[in-house]
Image (cartoon, helix red, strand yellow):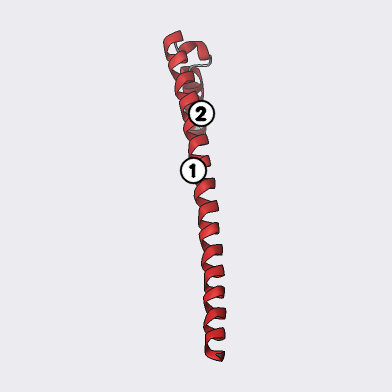
Amino acid sequence: MKHIILMILAVFALGVSTPRAKAWFGDAEKQRRIETEQKLIQQQRLTSNWQITAFLLGVGCVLVLVAGTAIGSKARRDAKRN
């Protein structure tokens, strides 16, 4: 019973000690946080664009490799016939 009371008091103390409003931060911190979030979103967009570009180039390279292998194989078979 003693442990339960201590746990309830600890939870109550933690609940009271945490800030409840966003007004806890000043205007300068809020503006800096907004700017940082905007920069993060822009970086994520750029990263996403580069990932899509790299993926498409990789798929294109694989397709060109397969096509080149097929052309080379056909040319070799045709050369053996003559």
Observer able to see residue 49: yes
Q: Residue at x 50, y 17 (%)?
A: 16
Disc 1: which residue: 50
- The relative height of residue 61 versus residue 67 in the rendered view (above or below) is above
Answer whether labels 2 and 1 touch (C-beta < 8 Å). no
Which residue is at the front of the view, 3 or 57? Answer: 57
Classify mark 1: residues with Cα within 10 Å, few (<14), some (14-19) or many (20+).
few
Q: Helix, strand, or loop for circle 2?
A: helix
Q: Helix, strand, or loop for circle 1?
A: helix
Residue 29 coordinates in the image, percent (x, y): 42, 14
Which residue is at the front of the view, 81 or 53? Answer: 81
Q: Residue at x 53, y 85 (%)?
A: 79
The label on residue 5 is 2
The label on residue 40 is none
Spot the residue most to the bottom: 81
Amino acid on which disc 2 is placed: Ile
Amino acid on which disc 1 is placed: Trp
- The relative height of residue 34 versus residue 27 in the rendered view (above or below) is below
Observer able to see residue 18: no
